[in-house]
Structures are given as structure tokens and as C-alpha cells.
Amino acid sequence: MNAPALPLTLGFHGDASFGAVVDALGPHGSRRLVIGYNGRMVQPGYHVTEVKAGSFVTLDCGGNPDAWQETILQVEDLPASDEKPDHMEVGKFLAILEKVAARVRLHQESRLTFEVGPPGHPMQIFDVEAIRIEASQVVIELGPRPAICKPRHRAEQEAAKADACCNPSSGCC
């Protein structure tokens, strides 16, 4: 059997769906789950305090309507305790999500958002940048979610596509 070399990094670049992250974690149930954010790792006693399933309908600053589903995992960054001396296993994390999914509809294709913070501090919103599979743990690397002007962002993406297409080396012109 050919096993991939570890560590193995799966990149999401802030565009992770709930289902893609669950699928990536699935084969690693016995490894510890660590969450990295703001240049640090959550403490071993972290707690999933809430799982939210949201449906958003919006109008951006250019008058464009938008709609999407989002799954939001709220995590309290707590130190280790006698009951929780180490980070929880991936299997326990997935069991929490399964228990929620039995009562709340969690859309597999929904955008995945993390809200993380230590007690007494404001929560911060993060996107999944990558998942790193290591020998004894899985690390979900979170990155900040920047505010964007969607019309300007779309225009910049379209301009980049047009530039790439009209580049003679792209072979499409």
C-alpha cells in the first residue's frame, strides 16, 4: 500500500466547504485535532461551543443580490484541564458535528467559518486556509477573513481572467 508522506497539506485558501473539511478529517479519527489561528495554536482544553447553520441573502454595495449557506463553528480557546489534558481527537470533533447534524441541517456545500477566541476576548472570524496531516495530529490552519467590496473583487477577478486568456502563451487567443 502506498501511503502519502507526512506531513501532508491540503490547501483551501479560504474557500473551504463544510463537507470538504469533514471529508478531509474523516480518515484521521485517532489523531489529535489542533486549530491554528493568529500565529498560535488553540490550547488543549478548547471547546466547540456552538455550531450554526446559516442561510444568507444579501445585497452588496453595487446593488447585486447574493445568497449562500454557511456553517459556523464557534470555538472557545481554553487551557488544558484535569478532564481535558490534551487536544480532542478528530473522531470526537466529528462526533460533535454528527450530533449537531442529527438536529440541525448542515449543508455539505456550505461555506465553513470558524469563530475563535479565548474567554473574555472578542471572537474573531476565520476561514480555513489549509489542513495539515501529521503523524500524531491534524492541524486546521485558519486565516483571517478580510472585508471586501464584492463588485470591485469580481471586476479584479474578471480582469485577471481576461489578462490570462489574452496572453499568447495561454494558447486561447
Image (spheres, rainbow, N blue to C red):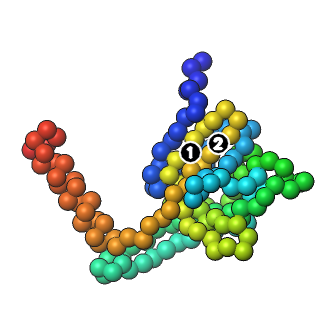
Q: Position of residue 25 (x, y in %)?
A: 63, 44
Q: Quadrant of residue 82?
A: bottom right
Q: Quadrant of residue 54?
A: bottom right
Q: Is residue 8 above or below residue 88?
A: above
- Tags 1 and 2 touching, CB below 8 Å: yes
What is the number of the mark on residue 131? 1
Q: Position of residue 125 (x, y in %)?
A: 56, 67
- Residue 162 in the figure: left or right of residue 61: left
Q: Residues within 10 Å of mark 2 (few under 14, many from 20)?
A: many
Tell me the distance, in whole angstroms, between the alpha carbons under discs 1 and 2: 7 Å
Residue at screen point 60% across, 49% down: 140
Q: Nearer the viewer, residue 122 or 98?
A: 122
Amino acid bearing label 1: Ile
Residue at screen point 16% across, 52% down: 163
What is the number of the mark on residue 113? none
Amino acid bearing label 2: Val
What is the number of the mark on residue 138? 2
Quarter placement of the C terminus:
top left
Q: Position of residue 31 (x, y in %)?
A: 72, 39
Furthest residue to the right? 82
Residue at screen point 45% across, 76% down: 57
Q: Nearer the viewer, residue 145 or 155?
A: 145
